[in-house]
Every structure is written in structure tokens, then in C-alpha cells.
Amino acid sequence: MAVETYMQGAVVSAAQFFEIWHHYDSDGSGYLDGKELQKLIQDLQQARKKAGLDLTPEMKKFVDQFGKSSDGKIGIVELAQILPTEENFLLFFRCQQLKSSEDFMQTWRKYDSDHSGFMDSEELKGFLKDLLQKANKQIDDSKLTEYTDIMLRMFDENNDGKLELSELAKLLPVQENFLLKFKGVKMSQSEFSKAFESFDTDGSGYIDEKELEVFLKSLCEKNKSELDINNIATYKKNIMALADKGKLFRNDLAAILCTGGK
């Protein structure tokens, strides 16, 4: 199996990384947990043993952390830490510009300048080029196009050729991805519109930080099993990183809270 070869130490290209990820992400959730994660760990240990190789320090740390945990969860970022992946492609998953949810939101704001709630392929291409330049890496346009296509294939869950905020947020490590907290409280378009309009009383299309705080308090009260009201300050800080001069536009908040936000 090709997967075994790369676990034994062969350098993984961007396309091969994509194939390996989807081999283990059998339910297409965008994360590995439960049996998927345990299967990855088992295959990793067996492949290294078969090749007469010890686990690398990164692999050992990974196995120690998740090997005996039934409730562990990893994203694409965590897998990229243990597979010997093509250097430039790997940078997208180790980019210091995206070290926290707040940093990610601010970067998203720069490229989704029209507040559409998604990036198309050209916007994504610019986003990836910028990340490489910040890491002092230059690649030719054909390689950048290849990376853009693979990122779309990796993250575009509904195959519409665009990436939503929640889809591209998978560039964040699981523990940093605060958007996962809102996955279980997604609102329908009509529910969201009714809630948003109760705060946007003048119909301007945006709310401010104080209005967002009240909005979040209401959301926490209705979703106590998913959201912790004591973390409102953190939720608010991360969400307001999407704001434009203190104005949080309707589409930006919908990208976090709404199902079918495109």
C-alpha cells in the first residue's frame, strides 16, 4: 500500500498527502477520531516496524498522545506534523501566521474583502502565495496552481469550487480551531436572519461588539451542552477579528453560525 511506503519515510508530495488523508478520513468529516485515528496509529507503528525503523520523535509524541485515547481527534494539521511532506506544501500547515483562531480570522478578513463568506480559487491562490512569501519561499505559478487545486480538493466539502470560513479553518490545529465549538449549534438561514435582525434594528447589515456579546449570551443559554458561557470573551474576541472597523457584517457572522451559508 502506498500509505505504508510514506509512513516508512518516503517524502510525500502534496497530491499523495491528499490521498493519504482521504484514505483515513473514511467518513469525510475533515477530522480523524475513534476507529479512524486508531487505524492510522496502528498502520504507522506496523509500517515503521516492518521497515526496521524507530518512530521519529514527532511520531512517538503523537502516538503517546493519541494511542490510548478513545476521545482524541486530529485534523490535517496534526497529520502533516508526522509525515515527511514536501517542504513548501508543509509550510501551509506550520505557518506561524495562522497560529491561533484570531490570527486566522484576521487573515481571512484580508482575502474575503467583499464579505461574501467564501474564497474562490483565485482568492485562495493569493492567500497561499502570501503565506509562502511570508515564509520567504518562492514557487512558480504552475506549482502554486497545483497547491491551490489540492487545497480545494482537501477542504471543499460541498465541491462548489469555493472555501467557506469553516472549511479553510482546518488549516488550524484542532485545539486552536474555536469554530469547532459552533459546529453543533448551526442555525438555519431563517433562524439566523431572525436573530440577527433583532440586533440589527436599523437594517445596516452589521452589528457591533456589544451587540455581539448579547447575541452570544443568548446562544450560550440555548446551547449549554455545546458552548460555555464563561468563554464568551474568547468567542467574542475571535469573532470580532472578522470585523471591519468594529462592524461585524451579517455574512461574516453567518459563516460561523449558519448552515448552508453560501
Image (spheres, grey):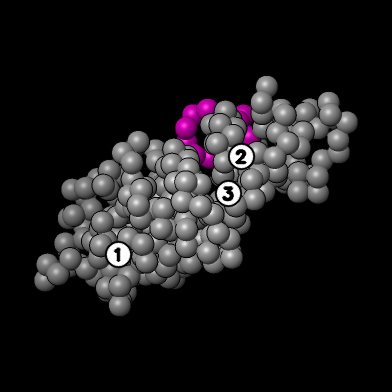
Q: Position of residue 155 (x, y in %)?
A: 44, 42
155 part of magenta stretch: no
User: Which residue is labeled 2 in the image?
Assistant: 13
Q: Amino acid at mark 2?
A: Ser
Up-down: is 10 above or below 224? Answer: above
Q: Earlier in the sequence, mark 3 or mark 2?
A: 2
Q: Is residue 190 visible?
A: yes
Tell me the quadrant of the picture where the N terminus can be found.
top right
Mark 2 is surrounded, within 10 Å at the Cα level, by few (under 14), some (14 to 19) or many (20 or more) other residues, namely: some
Q: Position of residue 252 (x, y in %)?
A: 30, 60
User: Which residue is labeled 1 in the image?
Assistant: 113
Mark 3 is surrounded, within 10 Å at the Cα level, by few (under 14), some (14 to 19) or many (20 or more) other residues, namely: many
The Cα atoms of the two marked residues, 2 and 1, are separated by 32 Å
The reply to whether dot 3 and dot 2 touch (C-beta < 8 Å) is yes
Question: Quarter-wise, where is residue 211 in the image?
Answer: bottom left
Q: Amino acid at mark 1?
A: Ser
Who's the residue at 54% across and 66% down the image? Answer: 134
Q: Position of residue 243 (x, y in %)?
A: 32, 70
Which callout, 3 or 1, points to the residue nearer the camera? 3
Q: Secondary structure at mark 1?
A: loop
Question: Quarter-wise, where is residue 149 in the image?
Answer: top left
Q: Secondary structure at mark 3?
A: helix
